[in-house]
Amino acid sequence: MDNSNLNTYHKFAPNVFVAKCRGEHLKDDIIIVTTKYGKEHECRVFNLVGQNEEFRFYSIVRTDGFDSKAWAERKIEKIEGFAANALKRSEEYYEASNEGRDFLRLAEPIKVGHHSEKRHRALIERNYNRMGKSVEERKKAEEYTARIAYYEEKANKIDASMPESLEYFEHKYNEAVNYHAKMKKGEIPRAHSYSLTYAKKEVNNWRKKYELATKLWG
């Protein structure tokens, strides 16, 4: 298969992939962009964000309604189900590990050679294994729960890969500029000697993000 004329994904900035194309496209053109694994996505062209002698690079959004926030929320729901199931299994194993509890509470020694020896040893081993499985399943539940925090951050995050980031970054940039200006005038007190420096750093940070979003989606 000749891949020379395929539109492919190209990493343009952190979390941002654009279409790398040999041909020229206009805003709102629908093009097919192919992943490195050969999967094709139908995408809508936004802006030309760069070019060289061989390629043009366009900001794009998929037309299939792919929503990173909804995707992250589905992940959270799925992992919460895994965590709940693991916790349920842990509790079931714990309950099962109480088999013969009243007898074992008496701390009767194993009667070596007695007809009860085999049953006694088997009971202790079963309960030991069940308790081990209970601990193992609880650890799984904890690991699943820890993963949820990652996807919650994804669900609540707006980054430059989203067209809506333009309005959001503009707001945050203007907010930072206003805060810095008021602190410089003394309208906002400085908590320490570096407060103004940090406030200026925030201005620069949001300006860069706003400029990137403007280039992609403006």
Image (cartoon, rainbow, N blue to C red):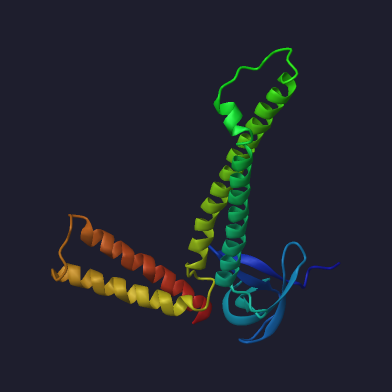
Q: Position of residue 86 (x, y in %)?
A: 62, 50
Residue lying farthest to the left in this orientation? 186
Q: Residue at x 32, y 64 (%)?
A: 202
Which of 62/65 is in front? Answer: 65
Which of 167/119 is in front? Answer: 119
Which of 46/85 is in front? Answer: 85
**Lateral position of residue 210 relative to residue 88, left or right:** left
Q: Position of residue 192 (x, y in %)?
A: 18, 55
Q: Give above or below for 45 relative to 34.
A: below
**Lateral position of residue 200 relative to residue 106, left or right:** left
Q: Position of residue 199 (x, y in %)?
A: 27, 64
Q: Residue at x 61, y 44 (%)?
A: 137
Q: Position of residue 218 (x, y in %)?
A: 49, 82
Residue 111: image quadrant is top right
Q: Residue at x 18, y 58 (%)?
A: 191
Quarter of the figure that contains the N terminus: bottom right
Q: Give above or below for 117 relative to 61.
A: above
> How many numbered callouts?
0
Q: Give above or below for 76 relative to 214.
A: above
Q: Residue at x 47, y 68 (%)?
A: 156
Q: Give above or below for 194 relative to 57.
A: above
Which of 21/191 is in front? Answer: 191
Residue lying farthest to the top in this orientation? 113
Residue 76: image quadrant is bottom right
